[in-house]
Amino acid sequence: MTASTSAARPALTGVGVPVRAPASATAPLSQRASVGTPASWIRTWSRSDGDLPPRAPAIATSAAKAAQAAIRADRLRSTNICGHPFSVAFATALRGEAALLKGDLDLAEHELLESGDLHHDLGSAAGEAHSLQRLAELHLVRGDRDTANSLLLRALPLARWSPIGNHLLQRIYGCMIEAAPSAEAARAVVDRAEATLSSEDDCHFCTIMLDLPAARACIATDDLDRARTYLASAETSAQLWEGTSWQAALLQARAHLARAEGRAEEARQMLVEIEPGDSVRISVPNAG
């Protein structure tokens, strides 16, 4: 991206920058692109009005795959496929994700900001929303809930009207729950997600990204029945994510439910089962 392009609009780090809905925003949800598994939605990742890149690697889902993802992203950017601007944008997002999973926050921030800029300039609402959401995760790691929430609020309308909204929305709402300043605020996000999402927004793979934070928020506000419902849904989704950190996150959520139900020893045993190297992706809602 040239300096003139970068200067033509506000950088992604700015808070409160208005977002523009893509042309598909006026179309009913049922008429938007329908995609199912991650393998299929990757193919619509960067779609606006242009052609798609020949192939795009799947996004890493655990810290153990971060190094491999970084290598694939570098190769993607350095080969002939990078003559396609969507490929460059996708590879940049992938490299940012890999850096985030490895804990290299400075590199992750640089790459995700660049990815957001590239996708914005290409008119790719999905790619821009994804980059904003990952940036929000990064700021949560740094303890900056305010910036995380601002980024998520910008990502939400972009995701809603993107071809892969049924995948992105689950993760954005899940991250909004984690970024909430209090247990009550987190529970309010759960209610908002329930009121907003319909059956057309469902994805069996991505639902765990909302289910687990929602379960934790319900536990924190003593609504154990709803927590059990979310955990049951997460159990089904987790079976599709074999070999990722979601298993550890699910076990952690089970432990918190067991402790809330008075099964302290069982909760302790569950937490002991989590491997030290596992990347548990959900946090306890802030009670203060």
Image (tube, rainbow, N blue to C red):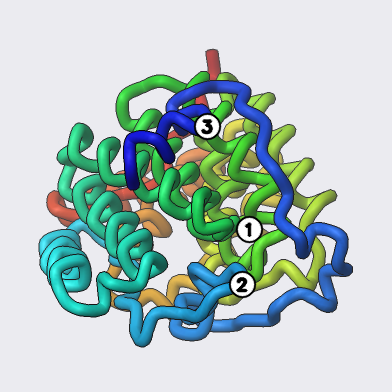
What's the residue at 55%, 72% (across, down)? 47
Q: CA distance from mark 3 to mark 1?
A: 40 Å
The residue beneath circle 3 is: 9
Q: Secondary structure at mark 1?
A: helix
Q: Earlier in the sequence, mark 3 or mark 1?
A: 3
What's the residue at 64%, 55% (across, down)? 159
Q: Position of residue 227 (x, y in %)?
A: 63, 50
Q: Position of residue 143 (x, y in %)?
A: 36, 22
* Mark closer to the observer (2, 1): 2
Q: Earlier in the sequence, mark 2 or mark 1?
A: 2
* Residues tagged 2 and 1 counted as in contact (Cβ below 8 A): no
Q: How many marks?
A: 3
Q: CA distance from mark 3 to mark 2?
A: 21 Å
Q: Residue type at mark 2: give it.
A: Asp
Q: CA distance from mark 2 to mark 1?
A: 37 Å
Q: Position of residue 288 (x, y in %)?
A: 54, 13
Label 3 Cα crowd, 10 Å radius (few <14 / some 14-19 / many 20+): few
What's the residue at 45%, 36% (across, down)? 136
Q: Is residue 72 above or below residue 177?
A: below
Going by the image, does 7 lie left or right of 233? left
Going by the image, does 265 lie left or right of 153? left
Q: Position of residue 23 (x, y in %)?
A: 76, 60
Q: Residue type at mark 1: give it.
A: Tyr
The residue beneath circle 2 is: 49
* Mark closer to the observer (3, 1): 3
Q: Residue type at mark 3: give it.
A: Arg
Q: Quadrant of residue 216?
A: top right
Q: Earlier in the sequence, mark 3 or mark 2?
A: 3
The residue beneath circle 1 is: 230
